[in-house]
Amino acid sequence: MSATRISSSLVEQAGQYELPVAQYLRLRAHIPALYGLLSVNAAALAYTHRALAPSLLTLKLPAILIVVSLIRMFAWMRPIDPASLDVETATRVMNRTVVLSAFLSAAYLGWALWLDRYGGPYEHGHVAIFIAVTVLGCVFCLNALPLAANVASTIVIGAFLAYCFIAGTEVQIAIAINIALVTSVLLKLLKDSFDAFVCLERVQRELVGERRQAQTLGEQNALLARTDALTGLPNRRHFFAVLDKLLNDPPADLAFCVGLFDLDRFKPVNDTHGHVQGDRLLQEIATRVSMACPEGTVVARLGGDEFGLICRGDQSEAELLAVAICEAVSLPVQLGDTLVSVGCSAGLAGYPAAGTTAHSLFDRADFALYHAKRHGRGKCVHFSEELERLIRCEQALDTALQSADLIRELAVVYQPIYNTDTMCVHGVECLARWHSPKLGMVGPEQLFVTAERIGSARTVTLTLFERALEAVRELPADLTVTFNLSAHDLSDPGTIAALLRKIETADLDARRLMFEITETSLIADLDMARSALYQLRKAGSRIALDDFGTGYSSLSSLHQLPLDVVKIDRSFAARLDDPGGRQLINAIRGMARSLSLDCVIEGIETESQLLAARLSGFRLAQGYFLDRPMELARILDKLSLPKIKVPSAA
């Protein structure tokens, strides 16, 4: 790189430094040119006087001056690292430059005036030009150091004026005055230029400071934008940014897994101990998860109590890490004076087997997590082909239900409930059916799960309830119609309010309506479920508890809920022939009777089971032996036929 380009680069960088350093850097760009000018002019002046003046003045003295100038020129051209400069060093060098400028100005002027004693008018004119050009060169080249320019100009012009007034002619005096005037104007311009330089440097330094501050703030904002404020972990945005970066240009041997972790039983802790303690719990969990992850693993809080993971390696390594995280999370946490414990479920999706895009990998990991929480909390489930089939099946169900004509496609069939003493129909239970033109017959469980997933649960429930109301109007007045409610229905105030409006506006006896629930539908929010059931009970309808005997809290359910009927789970009907089973069933029936609850035994599949149920005192029974679910028209036909023959005890 040439000296000129180096100097230009230094000037461009000058605004980044303190004023003395910037001043020194700018001076370095100009002083080599000044020394070059002095050397060339001195050589030219000596050459024109070579035949007129002694060799001391035309050879020895100018040689010394030129050598000194060249040495200084190359010294100033020596490359430096601007970052290594400090204010003290720059100030010291510039002070030395001021002294040296005074010395060299006096030396060059003394030599030039000594030469002026020799030669004729041309030679005298050359000396005057040499002095004038030298002064102009000093003013321009020392513009970054006005003190040195002023010192050099004062010495040269002052001494030249005095010399001309003492020993010069009128022409020389006029030339000297002219040079002095021009120099004075240039020094004034130099002062203005230097003031502008100082102002510019100050503004540049302020801009650099503001730019650095803005850059720092930008980096901090970028960090905050990628960081979860509560736990300090990377957030959802950072998680997907890393995932996209991995997928945009994956190496040939890239293998990694995307994991999703969701805390089990976190909501009860948060509700019981407050959000502050819940936040402390999340912070502790985040610390444990981070410590359990090896270097290079990305762990992020995606929101709420859900965490994301991107770990290099194959499926087995990811599963080992997921299990370790679940174990670390499940350890008790001290919150003040209370020791709490939560669990953790995980879902994993491996690249490229489970997907090749961020969206597909995340969705499959989320589905695996959903599967883990639904089929055994506290476990880790890795996405597989079986889950892929389930996803496709769910997607097909979602699409079909979203475009379904519910009024036309949804239907209700009715399974009779018999009085075992008279073998007359006591009531009917409504069972949902979905006849999809795309998928064919879809089971009720899949129907309701799909409806909840796509947000159509209320619409499906209300459509089916309209069918149930039609059955109430058409069936004899002494028959009860039972309608099933899901956990989602009980936890949705809008659904309960709509059911109450339909009951109120329907022209029928609400006592003929019975709403059937299961114990599993009470687990999510027992208080909300109890409130919904009391509202339905207040409207005149009755409440039945289905699958009784299989839940974890059957006895507590009997005491806490406004029940009228309990339906004993079908698994007990198979034990009617077993003495031990009969004792257990009789105990359940006795408990229900003591609470003034009617009792229905489900799952009657054989004549012997029906006989055993009668002998055990069950007045109401339901099962395939008695009748399968059927359409309303068939029920009406059956009611007009003779009743079923009562089995004989013999």
Image (spheres, grey):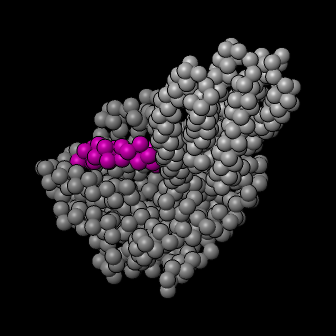
Q: Is residue 141 left or right of residue 295?
A: left
Measured as percent of width and height from the top left, residue 43 is found at 79, 22
Closer to us: 565 or 18: 18
Closer to us: 613 or 438: 438
Q: Is residue 586 above or below residue 122?
A: below
Closer to us: 102 or 456: 102
Assess whether residue 446 is covered by the magenta stretch.
Answer: yes
Measured as percent of width and height from the top left, residue 348 is found at 65, 50
Rendered image quadrant of residue 363: top right
| Magenta-drawn segment | 445-469
Q: In this view, does 84 lie above or below 177?
A: below
Q: In which quarter of the image is the N terminus?
A: top right
Measured as percent of width and height from the top left, residue 498 is found at 22, 51
Please tell me whether the stretch drawn in magenta is mainly helix, strand or loop: helix
Assess whether residue 304 is covered by the magenta stretch.
Answer: no
Q: In this view, does 478 lie to the left or right of 298?
A: left
